[in-house]
Image (spheres, rainbow, N blue to C red):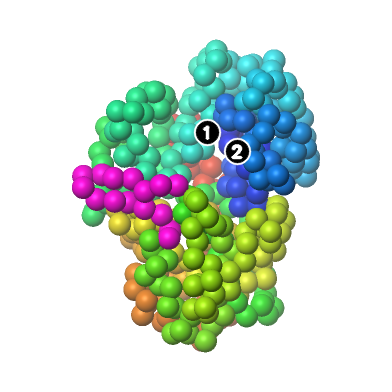
Amino acid sequence: MRIVVTGLLAQYAFGGVTWDYIQYLLGFRDLGHDVWYLEDSGAWPYDPIRQTVTDDCTYNVTYLRNLMEEFGFGGRWIYRNGADGKFHGAGETAARDLIKNGDLLVNVSSVGWLRDYEFGAIHQMFIDGDPMFCQVGLLDPKNADYAARLRAQNSHFTFGLNVGGPGCLAPETGIRWKKTVQPIALDHWPFQGGEPLDRFTTVMNWASYAPIEWQGRTYGQKDLEFEKFKLLPQHTPQPLVMAMGQGVGSKRPTEELRALGWTILEAGEVLPDHRAYREFLRTSKAEWSVAKHGYVAARTGWFSCRTACYLALGRPAVVQETGWGDYLPAGEGLLAFSTLEEAVAGIADINDHYAEHQAAARALAEQYFEAKKVCADLLAQAGLG
């Protein structure tokens, strides 16, 4: 099949974002398909050096070109500048031919609606990376155009493993959500033995966007969950290092967190690209992380691509329960917590049995997140396998 993946590789030229999208291309290619990347979100480029939106896409195109060449997709990428509508890479003719004559369009996190294209018989697959927020947005009258485009997709997937399941508060939308996880290209995340740095880490943003309201309840961001665990460094001798964005309005309480014992690094400075991002995870002993409040409060079953990358490296993870524990095995290599006491106990357990947790972490990645398996499952569930 000729498969087109959309994303934000050029728009947000950051390490974690890169891995969020590139691993779909790698997974589908490993299955033997003809895979292309098309970025046409309509957005004006974001320049991470100047930290501003601009009409100049030079930085973005250069980053994307180098990335595609590094991963073996040179000549199989297209970027359209939202500021002037110009196509870069393989160009406009190739882009329109892909959508008219291709077999599958994988729309990851609603970034590629391709409003002015002629669609042929191409199967349109939508992957929801933001459960609860996505479902509530679908029912908001102000989002009628967004909802119509999403509903028109041929198949609908979500990272919310518990959406539609027991205790999940994500609203019914009339869509039958199929379940999936992020694909991890294991060749790019090899198992790491030896002694890493003595630090539990994560990569996060203090708050990515404003909270939402649904049926009288507020569903917010990671800042709300982190508040519950901010005293964690006072309950464990384990160093805790967070590569953390400032969040909307730069409201992260940096000095308070540092005074409580957290090491706070500026994510944009220490993780400028996908290589630095991988190295940060590789040199960590394990991950400790909260999830977005909306994922936790709505019990969506969301599970992080970042955590799956830690597991692939043989780096165990202690991460907040969102309902994922009913679908992925917790206890060896991957530990869930809902309380401060559980977080402390999880960290101690990993430190006490580190080698066993390392091996179990890698085994989980191989069983549940290997890119070829995940992409094959997407095709099978969509009736394309």
Q: Nearer the viewer, residue 313 or 340?
A: 340
Residue 213 magenta-highlighted: yes
Residue 148 in the image: state x and y as whole percent: 37, 23
Secondary structure under tag 2 reads: loop
What residue do we see at 33% from left, 33% from top?
Answer: 138
Residue 262 magenta-highlighted: no
Instruction: Look at the picture and state if 188 lies above or below 144.
Output: below
| Three-letter amino acid code of the residue under disc 2 | Leu
Determine whether label 2 and label 1 are within 8 Å by CB. yes
Secondary structure under tag 1 reads: loop
Q: In this view, does 111 lie to the left or right of 130?
A: right
Q: Which of 119 and 78 is in front in this view?
A: 78
Residue 2 in the image: state x and y as whole percent: 62, 27
**Is residue 258 visible from the viewing direction of this image?**
yes
Q: Which of 82 and 106 is in front in this view?
A: 82
Residue 339 in the image: state x and y as whole percent: 34, 73
| Three-letter amino acid code of the residue under disc 1 | Val
Residue on which disc 1 sits: 111
Q: Quadrant of residue 57?
A: top right
Dot 1 alpha-carbon crowd within 10 angstroms: few under 14, some 14 to 19, many 20 or more: some
Residue on which disc 2 sits: 8
Dot 2 alpha-carbon crowd within 10 angstroms: few under 14, some 14 to 19, many 20 or more: many
Q: Nearer the viewer, residue 210 or 255?
A: 255
What residue do we see at 41% from left, 54% from top?
Answer: 221
How many marks overall?
A: 2
The alpha-carbon separation of the residues under discs 2 and 1 comes to 7 Å
The magenta stretch is: 209-223
What residue do we see at 58% from left, 74% from top?
Answer: 263
Instruction: Look at the picture and state if 178 lies above or below 228.
Output: above
Residue extending furthest toward the left: 216
Q: Dividing the image into 4 quarters, which one contains the N terminus?
A: top right
